[in-house]
Image (cartoon, helix red, strand yellow):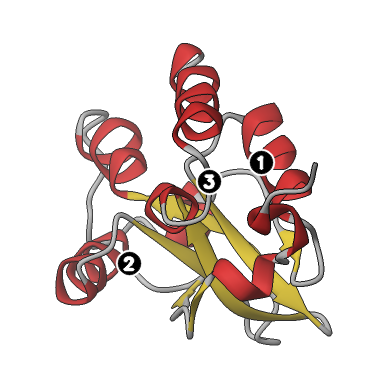
């Protein structure tokens, strides 16, 4: 038996219009951008407007501030976490597998080699049955 979420694709559940922070921007500017947009992660785009990685609020605190790095001199490109993304046509199941395998809570959505949105736990919570959402959260946070 198929669930409604099994028929939906990543582009159907993503939060559209994700804004990038430039790879040469400072970590402080990324933090301010996160504050202004009320988000916990930003995709990092290069000069060619291609996705280079993602930076999270946790990266800023743990890998930059706690390590004594200068928030104004350190670039987001230096802090970029691994490049994991999904295609807009990926199924919800493929999205869950990717996020679980990489133990990530947010994933950029790419179509035609361009960033078109982001999928977060909150986006998935609207689509998944409670049991499936609970299993996803358990698996992602188990390795955190």
Tell which of 99 and 10 is nearer to you. 10
- Count the numbered circles shown: 3
Rounded to the nearest whole Å, what is the CA distance between mark 3 and mark 2? Answer: 37 Å
Q: Which mark is residue 34?
A: none
**Residue 76: % across, % down:** 43, 60
Mark earlier in primary sequence (3, 2):
2
> Label 2 vs label 1: CA separation?
31 Å
Image position of 84 (left or right of 17): right
In primary-sequence order, the first of circles 1 and 3 is 1
Q: Residue at x 30, y 60 (%)?
A: 27
Does residue 130 sit above or below 26 in this rendering? above
In the structure shown, which secondary structural element does the residue marked by tag 3 occupy? loop
- Element class at badge 1: helix
Instruction: Find residue 128 and name its label.
Output: 3
Residue depicted at 78% across the width and 48% down the height: 2
Residue 26: give its label.
2
Q: Is residue 77 above or below residue 121?
A: below
Q: Position of residue 96 (x, y in %)?
A: 66, 41
In this view of the protein, which residue sits in the foreground, 81 or 18? 18
* Residue 17: x %, y % from top left: 48, 85
Mark 1 lies on residue: 96
Which label lies toward us, 3 or 2? 3
> Is residue 95 depicted above or below 15 in this figure?
above
Kind of element beneath mark 2: loop
Label 1 – label 3 distance at C-alpha:
10 Å
Could you tell me residue 58's position as x and y percent? Answer: 30, 39
Decide: marks 1, 3 in contact (CB < 8 A)?
yes
Task: Check the picture and name the quadrant holding the N terminus.
Answer: top right
């Amino acid at each position: 038996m198929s669930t409604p979420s099994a028929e939906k694709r990543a582009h159907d559940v993503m939060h559209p219009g994700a804004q990038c922070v430039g790879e040469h921007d400072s970590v402080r500017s990324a933090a301010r951008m996160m504050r202004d947009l009320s988000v916990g992660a930003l995709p990092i785009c290069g000069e060619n407007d291609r996705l280079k990685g993602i930076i999270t609020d946790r990266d800023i605190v743990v890998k930059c501030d706690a390590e004594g790095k200068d928030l104004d001199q350190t670039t987001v490109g230096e802090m970029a976490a691994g490049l994991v993304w999904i295609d807009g046509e990926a199924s919800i199941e493929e999205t869950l597998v990717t996020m679980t395998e990489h133990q990530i809570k947010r994933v950029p959505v790419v179509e035609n080699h361009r960033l078109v949105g982001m999928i977060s736990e909150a986006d998935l919570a609207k689509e998944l049955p409670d049991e499936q959402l609970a299993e996803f959260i358990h698996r992602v946070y188990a390795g955190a």
